[in-house]
């Protein structure tokens, strides 16, 4: 199977999806500029300005228009280049996209996808956040955050095919991550977690970029005789805990790694579920590894102390075993 | 230049005969709709007092000419979005009055199966995409359907209703910019009833001629007398034609007035009874009724008969709503939340 | 001590605060209309339009202006009449109010308070939500959600006196709740939970309106011989778990009651902390009582099945003991 | 009427002598600031390439006349807000160049102790309230300081900078409405450099004369040549005077152009090298330099000496930044998050 980057996998998926006339892309700087992270570079030239819609800087508008177009049979892919800007579209996402199906008694539905990115690299406090927990909290939204090129392609296709609004979360530091991806079209189902590494001593539950850091930590620890099992959630809503719980029953020890602030963040729900459903197998408190709870500092030195490193994960795993 | 696109206030229709192109049947139909809205709303108030209806209730009494005139300019295939004050637009678009009353009663026979209530009337089969309760935020959805239609080469026009208070929030301006930038077929209808809840127009908006806000986008705009159903209809026809022919969106500012409080809870401290009484003497239904009689379109007996039929229709709607069942618990399961619910293990809380 | 309603307690606090010339109130329909929930009724007449600022319907604007005014020495109290509309101001709250102190290296701070309301009563899907978890997740914000008239007054005063941005969450169904409130000014410190009922069998951790329902459930259960201890968190950020943990050490059993969706909601963090820090005392899984995870239905019948009732709390407590 | 408040494009300052009220010292000061900005920015680019500076870097090269001219119209007690492209405004306001460079290096001697970086220069002591990175959203804060000043009967004027791209987001309109509604002393300065990142003006905005957007609020507005520092200054003086005298806010649209990419990452696919070269021939610094020489304000030697001093100053700033310490870990504790941190038990994660 060809080995390609996350960026390439997303491009493949988008090219395939653009074969469907109902699909179009709307977002800032996706066309003339050439795409902030290169995902849609060349698309304007290939598909034209009607289907690659460079939008004004109006995030509420981008999402609102996508919802409206979805109501009348289109399959819009809206892009908000950084999740930090998505706060401006929260009303459209939470009060509109997430509600329309249910509030009108199932008469209509909103098959739109919002592609957006988490990420950081000395971008300071307002450009380095994750709002995963805010999206995942909202019934009516589906929330997908894949980690591998394979899942990126398969889940993006599944998201666009899905009749409900999907928040599709990428990561700026993951576009160059490589992996095997079949050339042909395929879908990875929304709402299914994946076992990405087998082990018997401890269960790590994680998703998105932290899958890769957890894998690296596991490699380190393997040399110390610690065998880590890793579950990639892939989807946050609905949340499939079945594999994580199965693993936890085996290991009795859990570490949850999520790239957001700890308090009231995604790791709280994941840990709470492990405790609730894995109660009889609990051998130790479940550890949580997260950002330090501060607005991200610009200074590289401090930033690296705020974010999650392979070392911090490895330490948390070691601690969980003692 | 902006001022070129703006028109003076149209005069109240005091013409000696109906305008060209309005035949008696149409005139009677407009009258029927206005009266049906009025009686429906009065019944709602009654049912609210009896606690048959809950939540917020925003009545359209006094504004009937605006909704009826504007919606009459649309045809099948066109789209409507509106706000929480949505009863009038729904009835004008021909939504089933039984289903509307059932919705208010929270019954499964309601337009939204009792899930939405007063603020969220909708009928997808009529492309009446619903009433929305976040002031001004639904305008963006309306621009979206217009975009979708355009991309699918469909001839539909989208009409969206909102209040004067909705023209200060950012979404209003984002919507106008998108619509004009991409020349989308949207008719924005601002129902200027001079108040946003209890805040007077001049207290909430730096300019009080709302149609002039379109100047920031070089958008065609017009202020019209929304109290006169025929004037409103003419303006809407012009706007719809402009939009449908690919010339871009239009902002219509309809001058109107609500005779009741903002919602059933409102004690109306912000205006006097006298103010309201003065406006009531210009009741759009009375004005139109006098015109119909003067023009010989109908006799007093004709109108009485019609009004009587409407009363019966509204009463029947109450019976229907009363007799209907409540929605089932599937609506508070995931199957009531998603068009394609996904089963997971362990299940989502609430299953 | 005089017994007054939550509404009266808030009015007292606001009247006292208005004695400080730096304080002003900005929000929709707080003046001419007479205030949606009556809290500022009569204030326009008493303090005039300069200090009781009826704002256009522009929630981002209301919060943004409050932030700016706070920077130059004012003590703005912004009001968003329903938390459902606050999504429109999320960027101002999260990217601005919460960041300014830290991002500029402590040069300036933002002493503003946002008063807003949770609540429901057949208001349907977009007017019945709680976003507590979203606020509580954000370092830089302080989040207060009192339950009693006493705490409402004392915490509102503390919030306005605080140099940092505070989200002050009221509840539309609580304005008529009564309790003892001293006439004179006093403050209740932010970040301190309270023990509101002593018991020995089970610990209920909750806040805001659920304190009252939990108290009612406790009365019911007391007749069955079950003695429930109840901790009112009062503040969500920073989260003071000390009393809850002390109680949990005694009872070994916990029930978390929060009026929001369960998944990724506030109860997840509260439960996770009980598990983490109370691990050695755990006798049973901690129960969580929440809204059903659906957009709120209008139909009264369904709404009552979606929200939390005294019975549901009582049942959860009984279950936790078996 | 809206058009009355709008002025024609002011002509490029090609007058045979400097305008009244500009003495040689002032002219030299303006020139010094422009050159300092240019050299500072060039040095930033160099340091970015050397990885001494990280994150996003948005240079002000080509736009110096706008920021310098506008800021020169302010006095002590006035306020400034700006966007992420903030270096020029900070230097024009007299922020310490050493501290600015240290900020870019992420050092504790930086204006924001190294917490903010390029996008977040600030100096509260100069009421330079900072650079903000959410396009258009800081305009509301600026209206807020103006409100605060007004309520405290302080004579301050708030000036806020933003780009053409920022005039399509809802916050822009909300800000203008609040400012005009309450007649607040705000000068909105739109730096129209014809692109929002890589999206051309006519692709993102339904009207390309940004100043005309003020018509929606009856706000005074003017389009000016932001390439000519004296023209810019004159317009800003008029606007500030208007605002300070209680007549309300003003929107200035400054026509300008950035010679570099949007940020250091930009490969500028959206415009040709030729386009940029053509604009470079009208470099605002060169234009002003020629004027100073022609007017006899300075000799070539004077200017060279000045430029040399500036080079040394920038070099010294690099040395200063390099030699400074990194911020301490207290900034990633709660004490670095809150003006009044509250200790709780168990402590917040990260303590
Ligand atoms: C975003 C938002 N802010 C505030 C409200 C509360 N609210 C509901 S209706 C209303 C007044 C709207 O006035 P207007 O737009 O003039 O419409 P009208 O009710 O007069 O028809 C307000 C403030 C809301 N529903 N949504
Ligand atoms: C709300 C928001 N949306 C998008 C962005 C990404 N972004 C940063 S600068 C920019 C372009 C802004 O253009 P303009 O306002 O013209 O200012 P200029 O950079 O040209 O000075 C964009 C889209 C952002 N920072 N904030
Ligand atoms: Mg109104
Ligand atoms: Mg620009």
Image: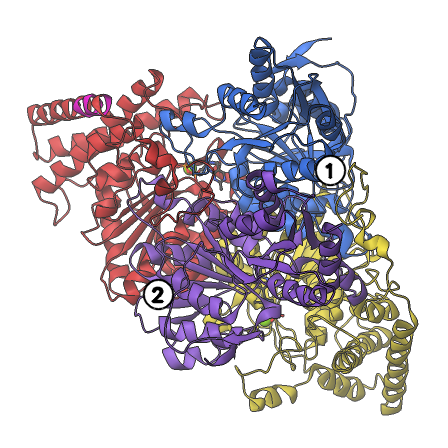
Chain colours: A purple, B red, C blue, D yellow
Cα gap from disc 2 to disc 1, whole angstroms = 60 Å
- Tell me where the magenta segment starts and ends, as one range: B316-322
Q: Circle 2 is placed at which residue position?
A: B183
For this view, does B99 lie left or right of residue D100? left
Q: Main secondary structure of the magenta part?
A: helix
Nearest to the observer: residue A129 or residue B179? A129
Q: Where is residue B57 in the image (x, y as percent from the top left)?
A: 37, 28
Query: Is residue C225 positioned above or below A232 on the image?
Result: above
Above or below D205: residue B6:
above
Q: Which corner quadrant of the image does residue B43 belong to?
A: top left
* Chain letter of the residue carrying label 2: B
Q: What element carries label 2?
A: loop
Label 1 belongs to which residue?
C277
Label 1 near ligand 2 (CB < 8 Å): no
Crowding near the residue tagged with mark 1, few <14, some 14–19, many ≥20 C-alpha atoms within 10 Å: some
The foreground one among C99 and B254 is: C99
């Amino acid at each position: 199977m060809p080995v390609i980057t996350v960026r390439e996998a997303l491009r493949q998926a988008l090219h395939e999806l653009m074969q469907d006339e109902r699909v179009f892309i709307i977002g800032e700087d996706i066309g003339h500029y050439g795409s902030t992270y290169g995902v849609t570079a060349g698309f304007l030239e290939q598909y034209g300005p009607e289907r690659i819609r460079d939008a004004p800087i109006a995030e509420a508008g981008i999402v609102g228009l996508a919802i409206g177009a979805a109501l009348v049979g289109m399959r819009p892919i809206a892009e908000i280049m950084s999740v930090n800007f998505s706060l401006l579209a929260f009303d459209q996402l939470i009060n509109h996209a997430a509600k329309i199906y249910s509030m009108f008694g199932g008469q209509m539905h909103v098959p739109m996808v919002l592609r957006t990115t988490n990420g950081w690299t000395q971008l300071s406090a307002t450009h380095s956040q994750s709002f995963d927990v805010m999206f995942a909290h909202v019934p009516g939204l589906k929330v997908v955050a894949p980690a591998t090129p394979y899942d990126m392609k398969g889940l993006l296709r599944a998201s666009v095919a899905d009749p409900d609004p999907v928040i599709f979360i990428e990561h700026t530091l993951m576009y160059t991550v490589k992996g095997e991806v079949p050339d042909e079209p395929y879908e990875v189902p929304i709402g299914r977690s994946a076992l990405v590494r087998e082990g018997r001593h401890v269960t790590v539950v994680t998703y998105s970029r932290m899958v890769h850091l957890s894998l690296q930590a596991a490699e380190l620890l393997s040399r110390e005789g610690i065998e880590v099992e890793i579950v990639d959630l892939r989807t946050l809503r609905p949340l499939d805990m079945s594999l994580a719980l199965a693993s936890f029953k085996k290991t009795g020890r859990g570490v949850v790694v999520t790239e957001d602030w700890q308090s009231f963040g995604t790791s709280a729900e994941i840990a709470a579920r492990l405790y609730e459903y894995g109660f009889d197998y609990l051998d130790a408190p479940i550890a949580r590894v997260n950002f330090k709870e501060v607005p991200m500092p610009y200074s590289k030195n401090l930033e690296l102390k705020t974010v999650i490193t392979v070392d911090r994960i490895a330490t948390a795993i070691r601690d969980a075993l003692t | 230049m902006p001022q070129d696109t703006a028109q003076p206030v149209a005069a109240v229709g005091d013409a000696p005969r109906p305008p060209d192109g309005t035949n008696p049947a149409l005139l009677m139909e407009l009258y029927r709709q206005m009266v049906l809205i009025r009686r429906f709303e009065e019944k709602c108030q009654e049912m609210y007092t009896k606690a048959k209806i809950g939540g917020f209730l925003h009545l359209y009494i006094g504004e009937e000419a605006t909704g009826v005139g504007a919606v009459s300019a649309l045809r099948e295939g066109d789209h409507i979005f509106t706000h929480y004050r949505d009863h009038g637009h729904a009835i004008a678009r021909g939504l089933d009055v039984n289903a509307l009353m059932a919705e208010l009663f929270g019954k499964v026979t309601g337009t939204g199966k009792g899930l939405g209530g007063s603020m969220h009337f909708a009928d997808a089969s009529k492309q009446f995409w619903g009433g929305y309760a976040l002031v001004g935020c639904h305008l963006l959805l309306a621009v979206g359907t217009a975009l979708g239609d355009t991309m699918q080469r469909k001839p539909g026009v989208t009409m969206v209703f909102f209040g004067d208070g909705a023209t200060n929030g950012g979404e209003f301006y984002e919507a106008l910019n998108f619509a004009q930038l991409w020349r989308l077929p949207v008719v924005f209808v601002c129902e200027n009833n001079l108040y946003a809840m209890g805040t007077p127009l001049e207290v909430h908006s730096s300019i009080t001629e709302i149609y002039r806000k379109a100047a920031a986008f070089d958008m065609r705009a017009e202020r019209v007398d929304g109290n006169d159903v025929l004037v409103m209809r003419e303006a809407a026809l012009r706007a719809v034609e402009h939009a449908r022919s690919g010339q871009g969106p239009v902002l219509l500012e309809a001058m109107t007035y609500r005779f009741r409080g903002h919602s059933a809870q409102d004690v109306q401290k912000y205006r006097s009874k006298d103010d309201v009484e003065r406006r009531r003497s210009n009741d759009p239904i009375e004005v139109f009724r006098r015109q119909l009689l003067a023009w010989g379109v109908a006799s007093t007996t004709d109108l009485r008969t019609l009004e009587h039929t409407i009363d019966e229709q509204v009463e029947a709607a109450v019976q229907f709503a009363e007799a209907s069942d409540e929605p089932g618990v599937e609506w508070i399961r995931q199957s009531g939340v998603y068009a394609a619910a996904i089963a997971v293990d362990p299940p989502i809380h609430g299953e």
